[in-house]
Image (spheres, rainbow, N blue to C red):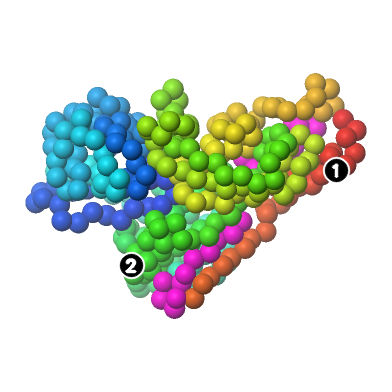
Amino acid sequence: MIDFLDEIDDEQTDDLLQPEGEGLPDGLYEHFRFVADKGQSLLRVDKFLVDRMMGATRNRIQLAAEAGCILVNDKPVKSNYRVKPLDVVSIVMDRPRRELEIIPEDIPLNIVYEDDDLLVVNKPAGLVVHPGHGNYTGTLVNALAYYLKDDPYYDPSDPRLGLVHRIDKDTSGLLVVAKRPEAKSNLSLQFFNKTTKRKYRALVWGIVQEDEGRIEGNIGRDPRDRMQMTVFPEGDQGKTAVTHYTVLERLGYVSLVECRLETGRTHQIRVHMKYIGHTLFNDERYGGHDILKGTTFTKYKQFVQNCFAICPRQALHAKTLGFVHPTTGEEMFFDSEIPSDMQQLIDRWRVYANTKEL
């Protein structure tokens, strides 16, 4: 069988970490799994997978299909198979997935809540969530392995435990971590069924005119730049994505918005806000590190450069997280303070909006 999967980045599955597959034919091991959305339009399986796997090409996916490595609902398919809603697409090989050794590392954690089943952590910006291509140590998973090293039930290498969802490296905010297999199964189902409650704060370029709105547009890998995601408005590629936003403040040439996720796609808020013309402030990957709005005055340019220095990352924070406790059935809701770098940035723009001296 072909071995191209060993080269592919593991950070593929949006912010929801999918469970391992079961019931595979003897001698085959699942390496990747994707579940098509309820709103998935008919799409060739090779295009479906290329949209979701950075580093894969249609030619490589087609070779994998020829080798019998592409399964849909546990049955091999050809590359021209058209994916339907709720299809389970798996990539399998004749050897186990190459596992990363999770090395416990004493990295400080901000634990917001903890009990026997789960914990909620407030992740700082700059901390990668999960080991993967180019980031094998120094991640949140390594920190959790150290923090829970004395818990006899917690094995950081067990896919049935640990992170239920993820947020980007340079996004700060709340994440829930499962300490027991039953908790992860229950919480994963809540994320999949979109019953969790998540709100983000974002500072975006430009004055958002509508007080509130709904952004809907499929999100997938940008064919022109595989490091970026993009919106496919025709709905023929990518995955269904819905973001709701509310404007909290309009501050000169930027707006402070609250975003509520209905789905959890890779870079969803960043991509959707750019799609409606309001790129996140200082989001380098999507062009927000340029001065996109404002005046040509030198003092204004210097003011913005100072703002970039204060918050040297995209201005995005996962502020709230709500879910039903997997054991007690109690509704849990957590809130977090906006980090100091982003708060200072907002304060600077408030002063500017009130004085407009630049």
Verify CB contact (< 8 Å) between mark 1 and mark 2. no
Circle 2 residue: 181
User: Could you tell me residue 201's position as x and y percent?
Assistant: 64, 50
Which of the pair 217/69 is nearer the observer?
A: 217
Residue 286 location, quadrant = top right
Position of residue 317 in the picture relative to residue 40 (left or right) = right
Task: Name which residue type carries label 1.
Answer: Val
User: Could you tell me residue 8's position as x and y percent?
Assistant: 32, 36
Q: Which residues are magenta?
A: 302-329
Count residues near mark 2 (Cα–Cα under 10 Å), then give few for <14, some for 14-19, many for 20+. some
Q: Kindly identify which numbered label has been placed on residue 351.
A: 1
**Residue at image x 41%, y 71%?**
326
Which of the pair 247/115 is nearer the observer?
A: 247
Asked if residue 196 lies in the magenta stretch, the reply is no
Q: CA distance from mark 1 to mark 2?
A: 49 Å
Task: Name which residue type carries label 2.
Answer: Pro
Q: Secondary structure at mark 1?
A: helix
Count residues near mark 1 (Cα–Cα under 10 Å), then give few for <14, some for 14-19, many for 20+. few
